[in-house]
Amino acid sequence: MTDKLASVDGQLREAALEALSYSDRTVSAGDPTLARLTSLGTRLWLDTGRLEEAAPLWTPEFSALTTNNTLANQVVQTGALDTAASEAARRIKDSQPGISDAVLVMELGFVVNCHVALRLVRAFDAFVSLELHPSVSTDIERTVDYARRYHAICPERFIIKVPLTPEGYCAIGRLSADGIPINYTLGFSARQNYIAALMSKPAYVNVFLGRLNAVVADNGIGDGVNVGERVTIATQSALRELRREGRSQTLLIAASMRSASQMLDLAGVDVYTIPPKVVTEFLKSGAGPEAIVSRLDTDYPVTLADSAVEEYVRPLWEITDEVRVLGEAVEGRGASMTGEELRQADADMRAGMFRRYTDAEKTMIRTDGKIPRIAHWDGCRAPLDDLMAQSALQSFTVDQGELDARLMRIAR
């Protein structure tokens, strides 16, 4: 950030202080079933950036909300932040004449994401997890710079999302060393999160369980039942082991739940991020507190098409000896390594976690959407967890493009 843009950040900090001091909040009554979940150690986060969607569901059992590029885009496309974006564009261009469109849209995205999050802080006095622009996902320095800036706006409430890439592991090592709470997002396997917890020590890692069930079912390689649940429980077990050993305090987020049943099936997992639709379904289901018991020791069965498919899918929940050796090699080194050094260590240890994607492959992934078509990879040429992370990142790039286009129209 240049000194000329410091005034923009300063105004956002003032807005954050106003949001934190706001006292005219409506406090809803608690829900006994949600309270039972929290009594098992599960923190409940609403998965939306839309204040109007969150307000009817908010109870004292919720402690945070989470936004991302898709959710921020939904808010911005309503026009709710057009005035704030227009005023920000004027201030930015006045403070830095000749600013390029590329830099301007990044700065406007920064401002708008802060406003989305601060609306939620003001309404609920909650923690808010907000995500970086996907264009910085493989740039350690820019990731660190923007994450520090976001955190400085509201260190009391902001949790910064960084997407899972080899460079992300390294950037988070620096940010965690600064004491910045990081939500290492777009995770899809126990091994990804095991390495993150050892190497970078983020506050949170994720398993996007709904998409894991979908990738198996949609590609016809199994019925998709329990895949995400099994990966989530395996990840939670691995992280609990690291906590007992004093090697990491990273918490797990069971992310992007698709059904109320998953809230029951994963009781006891550190954190849930729950879309409003799933919360509504859960509250209408009639499940009472007596239905909530810890499921952390549940061994969820997974049905796959054949042994070759099982070999391909099993690394989602399995932490092999090779992965453990890689973890020992990179433990505590996140702040000093580069993404390429991590890729090389992965290759040297034969852990098989990362693939170098060509531009053509990234285009194919973006075209396929959030759920990749396994047939495009001849079954096993790309690690499934790595492919899922890349697919999620590319899908965010599409939504970010829509958001950027609207912001640039406003700026002109």
Image (cartoon, rainbow, N blue to C red):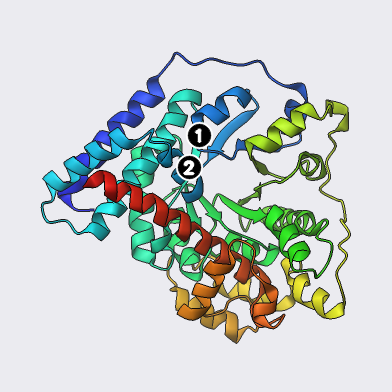
For residue 358, say whether it is visible: no
For residue 300, say whether it is visible: yes
Q: For the residues marked 1 and 2, what is the alpha-carbon distance in whole angstroms?
A: 8 Å
Could you say which disc has been placed on residue 284 in the image? none
Which of the two discs, 1 and 2, labels the residue nearer the N terminus?
1
- Residue at 42% across, 41% down: 77
Q: Secondary structure at mark 1?
A: loop
Q: Residues within 10 Å of mark 1 (few under 14, many from 20)?
A: many
- Amino acid type assigned to the residue bearing label 1 in the image: Arg
The residue indicated by pointer 2 is 74
Query: Which is nearer the eye, 253 or 349?
Result: 253
Q: Position of residue 66 (x, y in %)?
A: 54, 41
Q: Secondary structure at mark 2?
A: helix
Q: Quadrant of residue 401?
A: bottom left
Are dots 1 and 2 in contact, CB under 8 Å? yes
- Amino acid type assigned to the residue bearing label 2 in the image: Gln
- Residue at 65% across, 54% down: 208
Query: Which is nearer the eye, 172 or 177?
Result: 172
The residue indicated by pointer 1 is 50
- Residue at 65% across, 68% down: 385
